[in-house]
Image: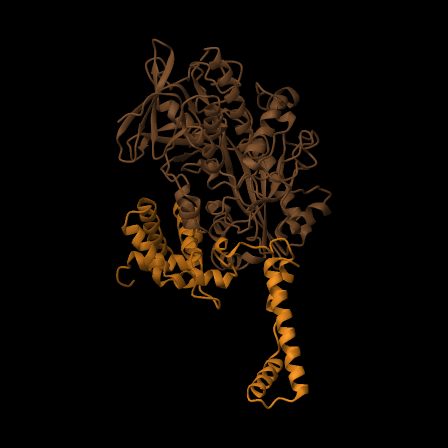
Amino acid sequence: MNLPSTDVVIVGAGACGSLMAKELAAHGFSVVVLEAGKRYDPARDLANSEANAGKIMWTEPRVFAGRDGVVPKMGVGVGGGTLPWLGVMLRFQRGDFHTCTAEGFGADWPVGYDDLRDHYARVERDFGIAGECGPFAPEPYRLPMPPHRMNWHAQLLARGARQLGAHPFAPPIAINSTEYDGRPACIYCGWCASGCTTGAKATASETYLAKGEKLGVRVVSEAFVSRVNYDAAQGRVTGVVYLDAAGREHELRARLVVLSAHAVETPRLLLLSANATFPDGLANSSGMVGKGLMSHPTWQVFGTFDEVVNAYKGMQMGHVMVQDYLAADARRDFARGFVLISYMMTPITYANLSGSFYGPELKDFLYDYTHTAAWWAHAEGERSDANAVTLDPEVKDARGLPVARLTYEWTANDRALVAAARDKAAEMMQASGARKVRIGLQYGAHAMGSCRMGDDPQTSVVNSFGQAHDVRNLFVCDTSVFVTSAGVNPTLTAMALASRSADYVAENAKHGDL
Amino acid sequence: MGQTETDAEILAALANGVIPADERDEGAAAVNVGPRLAEKLAAGVNVAVYRRGLAAATELARAKYGRDVTELDPPQTHELLGALREQQPGFFKQLRMDVCALYLSDPNVWARIGFPGPSSAQGGYPDFDIPQALSQRILTLDFSETDKARMHELAVKNQEGQISPDELQELDNYVKAGDLLALLQSKARRALL
């Protein structure tokens, strides 16, 4: 059975899709959100368990090709990536939007900080962010909740950072430090990535989507969108085809299609939707769909102390951050910059992120769990056309559809930059008093840039509002549209861009332009 | 060379190379990793990567030591894993992840490494922001054995109605000190310090 047609269909119930759904419903549009994963009741279905984390993470097959490991944390389910996420929500710097003009690095964005300022503030208010903007913010700004007190782990890390002249602070985090918007304050249980059981951590499902549903948004879970339909005569998309949990196919017609399936599944869906007009993938006349996938090169740096640290007590990420090395510095032999973020994991993740050593050394490391602290060294990743999401020619998912193939290799700048980040974290760990510093795993975090925005339809997939150059009633609203990766976590900026897209859609629809 | 080794036996030997036995526990064997991984393998989980890895392990052990994997001593198993890490990185990574996941899901192991496990149902950690050594020290404060014996002696006398006024005062002081200690510990737990 097919659903009745709708004004807007949104693919993906994560941070950006849920925001679009609520905002467009508030403007009077009928909205249906299709989500591949299940719907969970946090209190009943989520638990303090690493095995439990598996059900809110994307586990379908993907092919990882290329020299370097990229492991974007991908959530699945109503709430998307915000189910397992850790909630770091920083605004980008002004300079992040025009690195090409200023430094000859990457490309300039078709938007700037001033275009996003009000949207940043709106998201911070509506989603619920606690923290300080910090001494290196693009401008001083206040967040709706006071910062979290640093846990003991963060206080130890901050001590070393200060000794080296840096300015550690409690960064913006989407976890309540006080009761906010009907959700309770955090109890610092230390299990963020398994899915928050109390509701203190902001998720798309418990914030935007819950409000959207009150405005009439319809959410269909376990609905995997396999194709976006295109009508060549009209030059418009006409809706989507999706498969339900039983594998039955449905068509949903819509006046507007919004893709918010994140930077791997969004380009995959466009590639799967190739047709006679767009043989290389829908809205891909530029050839840029899937190209230029970006990630943040990161390094895990552990430090073991004589004193007990108990870093598992508190939010897993971001009780403290150092941004002193984020701004580009011409004296360094690499472009752009990095941040350091406190990050402590539950035991299995602690083991997995520690590296590849084994035997007595590994066992000692496991038994040092309560005495170990960790910095996450997190750098800006450079865009390269060679890094891409494509359809794998051989491997198919359970539905018989080609899976995403991720090809990735760090650039020379990535390697130099993240090495400097790692070394700085190690130096700070020593200054904090660690008796042993261990360099853990290096991997690529976050996925961005695979359908980038721009003014030129030859070199970009969408315009600054996420609207496809090739198809005016098709929008991409997620990190796929990023032009550069910047040095900080991407979610807030993706949501601010989506907020701007929602205003644009509402305004243009009023004039019948969509 | 002995009889044909089972998957469970080879996996158990390799798993104990990843997390070895020592004075703390039996290593991976403490949570029965070998048979549990063999079950997953029989159910088809990551079967291709495991098959390749196990075949390589057997071949390497025979080529290098003229023995089966299960017959190697701990230093040889360690060396074998080093070779597998180089030659079968996909298998080594999966094995290390799977062994750690089983080992670190066991509540007895949590107790040994000092991890309390699930915590949200108990209200999380209100002491998250105080020095953890201090938090721990307050929680371990207790009466000495001599004090405990004296308290017991006084309590028995009191029950039997044979306690003197001085002894009654002494018992009362012990009760007050006990209440104070309980309060302090509760405060440490609740981070009201």
Describe residue A420's horizontal placement relative to residue A468 as left or right. Answer: right
In this view, the residue in front, B41 or B161, is: B161
Colour assigned to chain A in the rendering is brown
- Residue A339 seen in the current view: yes
Rendered location of residue B6, percent (x, y): 28, 58
Q: Is residue A419 above or below residue B96?
A: above
Please state which of residues A218 and A88 is positioned toward the viewer in this rendering: A218
Residue placed at 66% from the left, 38% from the top? A132
Q: Is residue A358 left or right of residue A91?
A: left
Q: Is residue A216 left or right of residue A175?
A: left
Please tell me which residue is depicted at 40% across the width and 42% down the height of the picture.
A40
Residue A142, horizontal then vertical, whole percent: 66, 34
Residue A452's place in the image compared with A86, above or below, is: above
- For residue A437, above or below residue A88: below
The location of residue B98, given as percent across then percent down, is 40, 51
Q: Which chain is orange?
A: B
Position of the C terminus of chain A by quadrant: top left
Q: Which residue shows up at 43% across the image and 46% down it?
A: A53
Quadrant into which the N terminus of chain A falls: top left
Q: Quadrant of residue A75?
A: top left
